Image: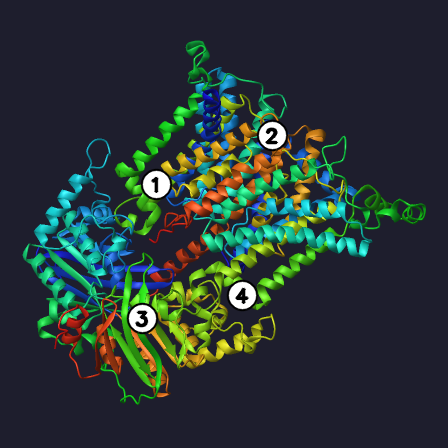
Amino acid sequence: MEVSSDYAVQMHGIVKTFGTFRALDGVDLDVHKQSIHAILGENGAGKSTLMNVLYGLLNADEGEVYLNGERVDIQNPQDAIKHGIGMVHQHFMLVENFTVTENIVLGEEICSTAGVLDMAGARKEVERIIDEYGLEVDPGAKIEDISVGMQQRVEILKALYRGCDTLILDEPTSVLTPQEITQLIKIMRELVEKGKTIIIITHKLKEIMESADKCTIIRRGKYMGTVDVSKSSEEELASKMVGRHVDLSVDKTPAKPGKVVLSVKDLHVKDARGIEQVCGLNLDVHAGEIVGLAGIDGNGQNEFIEALCGLTKSESGTVTVNDEEIQNKTPREIIDHKVSTIPADRQRFGLVLPFTVAENTVLERHNENKFGAGITLDYTRVREFANSLIKEFDIRPEDCMDHPVGGLSGGNQQKVIIARQVSSDPDLLIAVQPTRGLDVGAIEFVHNTLIRERDKGMAILLISLELDEVMDVADTIDVIHRGQIVGSFKQHTVSGEKVGLLMAGGGKHE
Amino acid sequence: MNSTVAKILKKPITSAILAIVIGFAVAAIILLLAGYDPGGSFAALFAGALSKPKYISNVIIKATPLLLCGISVAFAFRVGLFNIGAEGQYIVGTIAATIVGILVDLPAPLEIPLVICVGTLAGAGLGALIGWLKAKFGIHEVITSIMFNWIALYLCNYVVSLDIFHQPNSTGSYPIHESGFTMILPNWKTSDEGMAALSNIPWLREVMVKTDVNIGIIVAIAAAIFINWLLKRTKRGYEMRAVGLNADASRFSGINVQKNLVLCMLISGALSGLAGVLNITGISPHGIATIAAFENYGFNGLSVAFIAGCSPLGCIPASLLFAGLIYGGQTLQQVMGTPSEIINIMIGTIVFCMALGNVIPMLINRSEHKRATKMLAQESVRGGDTHVS
Amino acid sequence: MLANLLLCLSITLMYSTPLLFGALGGVLSERSGVTNIGIEGMMNIGAMAGVAGSFITGNPWMGFLWAGIAGGLVAVLHAIASVRFAGDQTISGVAINLIAPGLALFWCRRLFDGAAMSKPITTLPKVFDTTQFGDSALASLDIDITVILGLIATLVLWFVLYRTKLGLHIRAVGEHPEAAETFGINVFHIRYSCVIASGVLAGLGGASVTLAIISQYTQTAISGQGFIALAAVIFGKWTPQGAYGACLLFGFTQALAIMLGGGNSIVPSQILAMLPYIMTIIVLVFFVGRSVAPKADGVPYVESK
């Protein structure tokens, strides 16, 4: 494209390497002023890298950037902000125990004399911007106390406070309900009407179709083209993104549920601050069934999972597995009752990153006689076991056994965890956000694994913030709101809109 | 640079050796600037540690408590705990050993194990207490350790002051009963036949008669081997390493983190306590004395552990190096007029370099990256498979 | 009775002041995300530098200045290791505790003909000088000017941390350096500054021992105060006011031990000496609970460019 002032942002020939890995290989981007422009690609394709270059968090090895037709050199986020570019990160860059106001003004504080903060003035300014753009949030609340959707608004307000003209949103919808997504799209359109330009990084085809004007596709660091969204389709976008024809539906036979494996009755759990988050929850999972728990983040899922795993105490209620009560037992005892969990935060709870892949495969089972008699740990047997898992689950690279698991890609790390949890042959598998951060191929693998185990008779509880995943994979969909199950439906008998409504607390009286 | 050199430079032991070289270099520079003779000083240092058999023997004897305290700290560090309380655990080991050694008089085959057990248990108990306070109340082990170090110091002085233990006209306690000594053949070596037998082997005679040769070093080395085996080859060691590297994941996978922390501090305390015991049973005056300040066995254990890269086996050469430097350094003042503090500065510099431990691998990775990007820029790029590792 | 109270107060303030400077240094450093185990060593070099300055120039205030500079210079070492090279902050701190006292004693021997303790030097003035206040009760409140300086330092640090832009930046860096970086805050600059400033404060703490309490430098002038200061930081939950309270508490228990021990008492002096430390643990167990450090404390920050 010609360099011209019709375009808010133009990036030509961007190259960025990390060591021997070429993350961006001559990528172009041309964004019209006052438009919503999507950048589509799989995880690891390079979309975030491209935007990090634009925002000055990374420096490109080659290529030029033009803003409004003029060449610019952006070295760091301060430069980017000066040029009117704002960014809302996928993983929020907020200081948890500061207030909303403090986070918004950090770095551009309003001061009275010589560096003394004027927090009253700051608050007034923040309130003004909240009113102007209609982004409702409590300026005095601490970040750790507000919901994820609210935190995202704070991120947007940060950019607006600094007077940005171009706003980059990095995977903004991964934590939102259908209603909140609609709301966000509305906000984006309003911002565009007020003269802003929006670039949205995403791998969600539906949202691109609903909100974007144009879409640039990147695959493995290479520029694949820019399409006019109104003239395209989800299938076309998907195949450009992946490079082959993609079947977007999940293939599965109907479930054949057996006896009840997990039974939760009237469970009450408080959070770390003593506030009740699980408020009388009832849920059953049968053998050979996948129950999907749909809900907005912050409605008790975390406390529920922690109670199931034995990390938190419950106040009252029962949790039984195979007719034996496990509530308030230790994690060890629960695991011994043949319950296995795939944690949401794989690096924090699922793996010991400096340990080798082999050592990680026995993390829950190191005390078994299978891996050594008495007090010693027989590393030969551990490695044999690890080898079998690597082969069965196609963990790459194949010779990774003695390397630290921290060196594997996100998808392969998740495979290690899934391999470990599934191979212990549990009666109940709890899968929390199992496909977060994974690309299409890995997501396909995870879903197929879950369905395969279900067919073998495993009871599976799938807890995910991605509504599509729950709707596609689960046999039964339970909706959680304010710590209770507010609806339970068999797959294909309910619409996404209805579920979204229940997730947000509406539509219960039908 | 070629890749075998790069590989060698990335090994942890290279960092240690480089650290030692830099330590000497910095000391030399400071000495030069201050007008002292570095060459002569280093020569005196080596002579003071290695030139006579009795010197070497003393270095080994001095290394013993350092080795045990070093293992104690290194082990705790591997499990994610900073045992700055090794000093206090050492002291209670000495106190318990002295009390039992004075009050109880059994024949040697019973007395020695008893004294050793009691002292080790004392250290273990203090360690476990610190671990328990952390597990139960969340109190940082650094604060409680520091507090207990001082409590132990004053407890030592108190015990010495009690009439049952206080040796009149001295600042110390009575020595423990001879049956508790862990010295090697203390009576034989000074007897007539002993002296006769030794007179044929002058170096052995010098070592036996002029120094407090004892079995401590053997016990210490055995402890190093044991702890190394514990960490690397047992299920408990696997759990402890997991806890030290990621307590959240450990808890999630069913490991009892609290129990492991307390157990770790217990073992760590036991090792430091054992160091104390062996110093009482092995070296004269075989008793405790009123102390105005810490003797620093425990604190020096920190340095030993860090120089060893927190590897239990690595503590063996590290403790010998440390002991050699301290012992050889004592003569510097007399022989060369060089202040002995230069040794502390040298050791501090070595430890400091160990803190930068990952710098060299980092620098090598950076130069490898530069080389790779150059190569890639020269290749023409086709839609090839770029591996996502 | 009044005399006893005043005596108790003076001893409390006397003991707590060096600790306070060290603890304030610790708070500042750790708030920006760098653990500083080396406070003990920095206090030591400050103690010697203070004496050197006073001895050479004859002016104790020059000595006080030199002490701060010495502490700051040593802290530069720690800063380079911890910030620039993302090294292990604990190990670096331990190394400082070996190097700095060694340097201090080396210097002492050079300056005072090989002796391990300095000659007596001109000290900092007292607050309630007997020449001005004569026989009044105030005169028996024997406190040095450093006590007032410590109080001022606490207030200043509190104000900076919680009421200024700089303080907000420092706290942000200590909690979430990646986020701070995206706000345009230079994490390295902030951490360097805070570590060096903590060294300056620790140095001043050392000087407040040798230029005020014992009036000379000895090998045992600083023996453990740096570690107690570290404990005070944790005890005080990483706030300046908390550190102040912790140091006062510690000084108070020391004062109690001394006053109970004077003359004939049933409790042996060594047991009394243990009192401050035992009390600290008891207070921790029953009143303080879990201390939560700044989130990024002790975690080296590696820039990704």
Q: Where's residue C118, x and y in %?
A: 58, 22
Mark 2 or mark 4: which is in front? 2
| Residue shown at the point (18%, 52%) measured from the top left | A86
Q: Where's residue A420, x and y in %?
A: 43, 75
**Element assignment for label 2:** loop
User: Which mark sits nearer the N-terminus, 1 or 2?
Assistant: 1
Q: Amino acid at mark 1?
A: His
Q: Which residue is mark 3?
A: A267
Q: Which residue is mark 1?
A: C189
Mark 3 or mark 1: which is in front? 3
Question: Considering only vertical position in the picture, is A260 above or below A208?
Answer: below
Q: Amino acid at mark 3?
A: Leu
Q: CA distance from mark 3 to mark 2?
A: 60 Å
Q: Where's residue A5, x and y in %?
A: 9, 54
Mark 2–mark 4 CB contact (< 8 Å): no
Q: Are marks 1 and 2 on the same chain?
A: yes
Q: Which residue is mark 2?
A: C265
Mark 1–mark 2 CB contact (< 8 Å): no
Mark 3 or mark 4: which is in front? 3
Quadrant where the image shows the C terminus of chain B: bottom left
Which of the labelled discs sits on residue B238, or is there none? 4
